[in-house]
Image (spheres, rainbow, N blue to C red):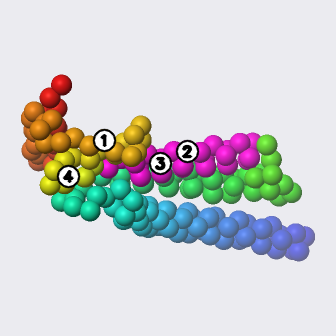
């Protein structure tokens, strides 16, 4: 009787320790995800400049890259969480060996590569002679000479919003 009570108490203690370790693991995973997103964002900006920047560029504008870099972390975190969730349901099978696991893994990789491609090809450069715009639909750049520009509207939207600009071309 005493032995059964001790075993029950030991099982309860193990569950509490397991719950605490899961919370700590979640906090560490969130921290690592944020650090990874920041490093990814800085690294992608560096790569964009190395790959796409013309020699005489004056400044660049990365379009929605930081937000997409943060979104690129979501599939990675989702994979880890699904793996943990599956591990508690079934101790015998690896999640990525199941059909569902393989489908989710492929979908996450495709999603991540799509986000990465969109971030990498979404940048504009202003040079002395032209404006070069890289987009996912035309990653090799479309160059607009200043003679083609009819109007440039720029400013700040709201108190907390960033700088914006809109270029109207002669058509």
- Residue 21 in sight from this viewpoint: yes
Determine the CA span between mark 3 and mark 4. Answer: 22 Å
Q: Earlier in the sequence, mark 2 or mark 4?
A: 2
- Residue 146 point in image, percent of width and height: 13, 42
Question: Crowding at label 2, few (<14), some or many (≥20) Cα neighbours within 10 Å?
Answer: some
Q: Label 1: which residue? A: 142
Expressed as whole percent of the image width and height from the top left, the position of residue 19 reads 64, 64
Residues at marks 3 and 1 touching, judged by CB atoms closer than 8 Å: no
Number of the front mark, 2 or 3: 3
Out of 11 and 129, give the one closest to the viewer. 129
Q: Which residue is mark 2?
A: 111
Q: Is residue 14 above or below residue 98?
A: below
The residue depicted at 79 percent of the width and 43 percent of the height is 99
Res. 117 mark: 3
116 vs 105, left or right, is: left
Between 57 and 10, the one lying in front of the other is 57
Q: Secondary structure at mark 3?
A: helix
Magenta range: 100-123
Circles 3 and 4, Cβ within 8 Å, touching? The answer is: no
Q: Position of residue 98 (x, y in %)?
A: 80, 47
Q: Which residue is mark 4?
A: 126
């Amino acid at each position: 009787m005493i032995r059964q009570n001790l075993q029950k108490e030991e099982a309860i203690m193990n569950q509490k320790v397991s719950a605490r370790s899961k919370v700590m693991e979640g906090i560490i995973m969130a921290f690592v995800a944020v650090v990874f997103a920041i490093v990814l964002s800085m690294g992608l900006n560096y790569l964009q400049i190395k790959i796409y920047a013309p020699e005489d560029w004056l400044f660049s504008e990365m379009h929605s890259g930081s937000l997409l870099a943060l979104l690129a972390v979501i599939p990675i975190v989702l994979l880890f969480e699904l793996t943990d969730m599956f591990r508690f349901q079934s101790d015998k099978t690896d999640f990525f060996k199941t059909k569902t696991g393989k489908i989710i893994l492929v979908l996450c990789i495709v999603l991540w590569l799509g986000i990465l491609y969109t971030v990498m090809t979404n940048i504009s450069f202003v040079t002395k002679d032209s404006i070069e715009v890289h987009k996912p639909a035309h990653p090799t750049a479309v160059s607009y000479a200043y003679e083609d520009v009819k109007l440039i509207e720029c400013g700040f939207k709201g108190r907390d919003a960033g700088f914006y600009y809109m270029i109207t071309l002669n058509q």
